[in-house]
Every structure is written in C-alpha cells, then in structure tokens.
C-alpha cells in the first residue's frame, strides 16, 4: 500500500442534487405521493383506465419510477463507491504523489458548476415543457398523449392539478438523473486518465494475478451498462410515441426521447472502452516486458552447455519458464473480461432489438 493512513488522501463524498435536496426516506415518499397523485388523477378522472391501458402509459410510468430510483442510487452510492474503489487500489499508482494528485483532480472536477446548474436548468425546462405541452394539447385539442379526453367542468380543474403534479414529479426526476449522469461522466473521464503520462501505473505480476485492475473494470461496467440499457429503452419509448400517436406533441416527445436515448447510448458505449485504454496499454507493456525477459532467459539456457544431469535440470527450468510465459499471456489485457462483456451486450441486444423491430412491423 502507498500509505498506511488512507485518510490523508481520501476525499469527502461530493454533494450532488440528491444530497442538496436531502433526499432521505421522507422526501422520497413525498415524490411518490406527488407522482401517484398525478397517476390517480390521470387514470381515474381524466383518461380513464381503458384509455390509460390503450395508450400503454403503464410502460412509461414504470420506466420513470425505475429511472428515479436509479438517479437516487447514482447520487448516494456511486461517488462513495468510486472513492472506496480508488482507495482500496491506490497501490496501482506509480507514486503516492501521483495518487494524491489524481484525487485532487477528481475533487476539482466534481465541484464544477456544470453539475450544479445544468441539471437545474434542464429541470426547469422540463417543468415548463410539460405545462406548455399539456395546456396546448389538453386545453386546445382536448387530448392527452394522442388520446381524446373530456376536459370540461371538474375534469378541467383536475387536469390543471394533474399537469402541475406531473411537471413537478418529472422536473425532480430530471434534476436527480442529470446530476447523476454528469457525475458519472466526470468519473469516467477521471478514470480515463489513470495509466496516462500524467498518472502512470505501477503494474506488477501480483496485481495482475490478484485482479487489482479488475475492480476498475467492474466499476466502469457497473456504471456504463445500466445507463446504456436505460437510454436504449428510452429510445424504444420514443419510437413507441412516434409510431403510436399521430400528433405533433407525440412526434416532439418521441423524437426527443429517441435522439437523447441514442446519444447517451453512443456516448457511454464509447466511454466504456475508452476509459480503459491507458490501463490496457500499461498492462500490455508490462506483459510484453515480462514475456521478453522470460524468452531471453530461455535463450540463455538453450545456448548454455551442461552435463547430462544438468541438461535435465535445464530443460525442467525451461519448461517452468514456458508455463510461466503462458500464465502471463493468458492474463486479460483489459481491466475486465471482454468475453463476459460481449455476452452481456449480446443478451441486451437479443432482448431489445426484436422489441424495436416490432415497431417497424419487421419483428
């Protein structure tokens, strides 16, 4: 270990919007009360259960709840898990000072104004967009999500309440999720610097055999894959809007979901591999050095002369060196298992692609 006292180098868990709002159990309950109040108004007083089912709104409602919980998880767990992962594997850094500078770099990046203002701006825009779209469609065309709804008398009052509750719930969701996504991007960009000339690594055979770099790979996968899956599903919802409802607002929502979801999927798919490039290169260089040394040793032994008894001992050593060479060669060049990742991607595609194709009538 670089330092026996990890606290000298550890950093405090950064405050995100989930912390600023003090989103504990009580506030989480308030969010669900707001969301389910809007759901009850929509299902039982505005659209009706039959229209709600025919519009497949339950898919979107379930997706929003999952994303909301995922946003809370990102804010509360991811920075701390990152801190623990880096602290537990600080020995991979070449020097103690390099490790300390890396933590300082991350601290500076995580405190940027982007994470504070951008989610807040998106949250306000989401609130205004839902109100604007709702008032335009429901009050002008008497429809919600492409479905005609009665908006007279008490229903109109309930509709106004519904729109405000829905806008509030979605704005909170956007605030937490966008805050978490920005933090994940900052973390992945920070991890991408590990192994670079700025933060060189101290690769050893012990670290490779114990899987010291696997923790980084698993952490990157745990961040990237759920976001790729969620954004892909968001694109599917966008396609659902586009091909199910023949309205201007449905097209706007559908293409917005499709473009945003596809963009996020592409970005994190690229980051998934890019963030291990320098680590991969460091491991490859070390493996090449080790294999070169072993082969040089074998060449020396082959060129040496010895007695009959010494000849047997020489070949035994050469055999052991070849086995050592094979063990080093079999160690993964990446801080995660590429085969397992391929299986995971194939599994996701096999379940999502048919769902997407069904919207085009090809499935």
Image (spheres, rainbow, N blue to C red):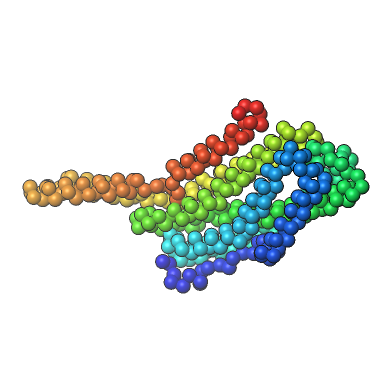
Q: Quadrant of residue 184?
A: bottom right
With respect to residue 292, does 113 lie above or below?
A: below
Q: Position of residue 129 (x, y in %)?
A: 80, 47
Residue that lies at the very extreme toward the right in this rendered image = 153
**Is residue 8 something that shows in the picture?**
yes
The answer to whether residue 210 is left or right of residue 307 is: right
With respect to residue 157, does 355 lie above or below?
A: above
Residue beneath the point at 62% across and 53% down: 70
Q: Position of residue 119 (x, y in %)?
A: 71, 55
Residue that lies at the very extreme toward the top in this rendered image = 362
Q: Out of 254 and 331, give the one closest to the viewer.
A: 254
**Is residue 118 something that shows in the picture?**
no
Q: Out of 14 and 313, give the one closest to the viewer.
A: 14
Q: Quadrant of the N terminus?
A: bottom left
Q: Out of 307 and 332, give the one closest to the viewer.
A: 332
Q: Position of residue 304 (x, y in %)?
A: 15, 47
Residue beneath the point at 36% across and 48% down: 331
Q: Quadrant of the C terminus?
A: top right
């Amino acid at each position: 270990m670089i330092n026996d006292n990890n606290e000298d180098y550890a950093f405090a868990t950064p405050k995100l919007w989930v912390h600023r709002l003090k989103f504990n159990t009580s506030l989480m309950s308030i969010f669900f009360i707001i969301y389910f109040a809007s759901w009850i108004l929509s299902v039982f007083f505005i659209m009706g259960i039959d229209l709600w089912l025919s519009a497949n709104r339950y898919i979107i409602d379930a997706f929003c709840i999952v994303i909301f919980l995922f946003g809370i998880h990102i804010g509360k767990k991811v920075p701390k898990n990152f801190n623990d992962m880096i602290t537990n594997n600080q020995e991979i850094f070449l020097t103690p000072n390099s490790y300390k500078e890396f933590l300082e770099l991350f601290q500076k990046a995580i405190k940027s104004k982007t994470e504070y203002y951008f989610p807040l701006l998106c949250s306000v825009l989401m609130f205004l967009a839902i109100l604007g779209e709702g008032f335009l469609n429901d009050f002008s065309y008497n429809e919600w999500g492409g479905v005609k709804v009665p908006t007279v008398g008490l229903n109109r009052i309930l509709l106004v309440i519904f729109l405000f509750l829905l806008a509030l719930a979605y704005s909170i969701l956007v605030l937490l999720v966008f805050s978490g996504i920005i933090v994940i991007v900052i973390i992945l960009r920070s991890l991408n610097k590990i192994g670079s000339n700025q933060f060189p690594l101290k690769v050893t055979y012990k670290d490779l055999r114990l899987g010291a770099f696997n923790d980084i790979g698993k952490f990157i996968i745990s961040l990237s894959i759920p976001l790729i899956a969620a954004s892909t599903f968001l694109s599917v919802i966008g396609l659902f809007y586009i091909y199910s409802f023949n309205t201007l607002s449905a097209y706007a929502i559908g293409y917005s979901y499709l473009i945003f979801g596809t963009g996020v999927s592409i970005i994190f798919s690229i980051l998934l591999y890019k963030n291990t490039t320098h680590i991969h290169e460091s491991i490859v260089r070390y493996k090449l050095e080790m294999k070169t040394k072993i082969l040089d040793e074998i060449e020396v032994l082959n060129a040496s002369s010895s007695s009959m008894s010494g000849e047997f001992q020489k070949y035994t050593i050469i055999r052991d060196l070849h086995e050592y060479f094979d063990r080093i060669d079999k160690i993964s060049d990446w801080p995660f298992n590429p085969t397992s990742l391929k299986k995971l991607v194939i599994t996701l595609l096999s379940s999502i692609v048919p769902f997407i194709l069904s919207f085009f009538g090809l499935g």
